[in-house]
Amino acid sequence: MRNRYPALRPVVLIAAFLSSAVFVTGSPATAEDAEKAPESVSVFDKAELKVPAEFKRTQPASRIVQHEFKVGEGDSTARLTMMAAGGSVDANIKRWKGQFSGGDEADQKSEKMDIGKWTVHIVDVSGAYAERMGGGPFAGGKVVQRENYAMAGAILIEPEGRQFFIKMIGPADVVKANREKFVAMVKSIGQ
């Protein structure tokens, strides 16, 4: 079949190339750089959290968890979860603290701050962690006591009032070693 518009052929080819091409700007120069690059997680399509590259994405262990990361290496890792949730801030903080017993009193603290337009509550707890195995956070299921555990948690509240929960729970040494990165990630919501 004869092309009625031979002058359009190069334009069509260029358009086809451009529509199938992937343009990457600011991409890491090497695979090693890519591993060090932080991942971004969208929160209510309103803001981004910059997740440290050392926190490795994993498949969420529960359907209610939107994002899950592994913090630490080998057998000593903490679980970092992110999800939208509701309820009063005080009730959730009380529930989180109630999942732990014992622990150094100086390690049990919470603080409230404003980061940009967001209100943020950061909670630290340590001691013996009563982990529910199956049944979800509000239902039955076997409870396993995890000695010498800790949690760094955050409740992010957007200007319209929706809440986003971030919790890092695991061996106390792993949580404490990564707390500074956790807080920096939470504070990135205002950038």
Image: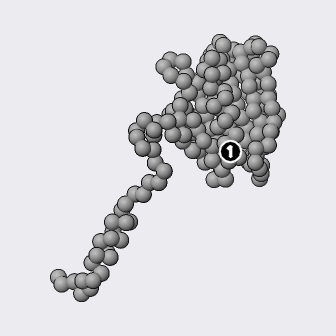
Task: Say few, some or many: other residues with alpha carbon within 10 Å of mark 1 (under 14 / 14 to 19 / 20 or more).
Answer: many
The answer to which image quadrant residue 81 occupies is top right
In front: 2, or 29? 29
- Position of residue 9 in the picture relative to residue 37 (left or right): left
The quarter of the picture where residue 29 lies is top left
Amino acid at pointer 1: Ile
Is 137 drawn above or below residue 25 in the view shown? above
Corner quadrant of residue 23? bottom left
Q: Is residue 25 above or below residue 182?
A: below
Residue 10 vs residue 79: left or right?
left
Instruction: Tell me the SS state at disc 1.
Output: helix
* Closer-to-camera residue (102/109): 109
Residue 6 relative to residue 190: left or right: left
Looking at the image, which residue is at 78% across and 30% down? Answer: 93
Q: Residue at x 70, y 31 (%)?
A: 153
At which x and y percent is residue 96?
A: 74, 27
Q: Where is residue 130 drawn, in percent x and y?
A: 67, 19
Q: What residue is at 76 percent from the left and 24 percent from the top?
A: 97
Farthest-out residue, bottom = 4
Q: Residue at x 79, y 17 (%)?
A: 106
Measuring from the top left, give residue 132's x and y in whole percent: 63, 23
**Quadrant of the image containing the N terminus:** bottom left
Q: Position of residue 168 (x, y in %)?
A: 64, 28
Colour convention of the picture:
one colour
Q: Which residue is mark 1?
A: 189
